[in-house]
Amino acid sequence: MAPARSAYAVFAIAMSVLIVGASASYLVVEGPVSSLVYGNGTLALGKVGPGESFYVLASATTANASGAIINIGWDTLEAARLPPGWASQASPAYENPMKLKVTVAPNATNGTYTMELRAVNIGNYSRLGNLTFNASIRVTPNVFITNVTPATLVAGVGQPSNLNVVINNTGASDDPFVLNAQNIPGWYQPIEVISQHSTSSTYLYPVLINEPGIYHFNFTISSSSSPLLQHTYNITLVAESSLMNDYMATGQGVVLSPVIYEPAYAVMLALNYAYRLIFR
């Protein structure tokens, strides 16, 4: 969530507290959704893929039983109960905003799961006790929408061309995704990008071929968290030989050109040598 949106959401929640009247402690949740939660309340966090991790962010500010605002009321946010096979990491003590990490089991089947989360006032120093609430999240592999263009790349030999990769992350996880070209001549390094939740971003993946020809390869967008979260595209690359590319190759002692271009190459090579002799 962008800082401006987050600040606006927190302000709106705070105003609702003032309007309703703060008669009990509450928790201002800032991500992956914005909400105000009271003890034994419920909260829907959205959706997440199997094996992915997501964060629950919440403000440390709350109110006591008399309605007085306490800026550092909650000291940590933790998971009191999770579905089998899930894991969590409580927020560091006195962190603000608090940031609880939850990791979904890699073999979690599709469906809605409920967990019990708890905001803790360590040592009950502010006389708040703990605030416990239920949070639900839906597990599904359909947590991102992608697009790769163009389906056919046309480029000169030795000239890099870019694939435009769009990832629209509709889930609750800020998941790292790996972009990778497969079954194509040459050495290609996978690129890892971070896709923020509820955000659509565009990335560039460069492709370069040193030999003319038509190449067909697979391009994958996969989550680093789960092999179940992957999209594959079939891409065609047309690497075209150009006069300048072939001339440069000829100047290095490599003849790559068709016979019809040889007179032109000879002239260009002669001009190149003459230039070197005159201006060296």
Image (cartoon, rainbow, N blue to C red):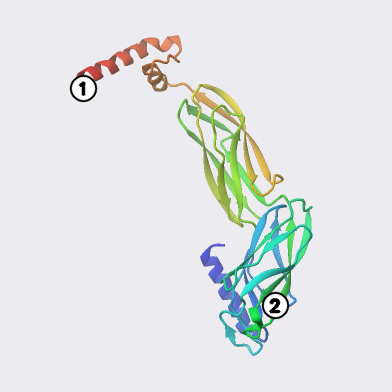
Q: Which quadrant does the C terminus fall into?
A: top left
Q: Residue at x 62, y 81 (%)?
A: 17
Q: Local crowd at mark 2 within 10 Å, few (<14), some, or many (≥20)?
A: many
Foreground residue, 116 or 271? 116
Residue position marked by numbered label 2 in the rendering: 131
Compared to 10, does 186 lie above or below?
A: above
Q: Residue at x 41, y 22 (%)?
A: 245
* Mark sitting earlier along the chain (2/1): 2
Q: Residue at x 55, y 28 (%)?
A: 237
Residue position marked by numbered label 1 in the rendering: 279
Q: Residue at x 64, y 90 (%)?
A: 66
Position in image of residue 86 (x %, y %): 74, 59
What is the CA distance from the residue labelled 2 to the residue labelled 1? 81 Å
Position in image of residue 156 (x %, y %): 46, 26
Q: Is residue 73 left or right of residue 3?
A: right
Give the image quarter of residue 149: top right
Q: Is residue 116 left or right of residue 58?
A: right
Foreground residue, 170 or 56? 56
Position in image of residue 98 (x %, y %): 60, 70
Q: Amino acid at mark 2?
A: Leu
Q: Amino acid at mark 1?
A: Phe
Q: Which quadrant does the N terminus fall into?
A: bottom right
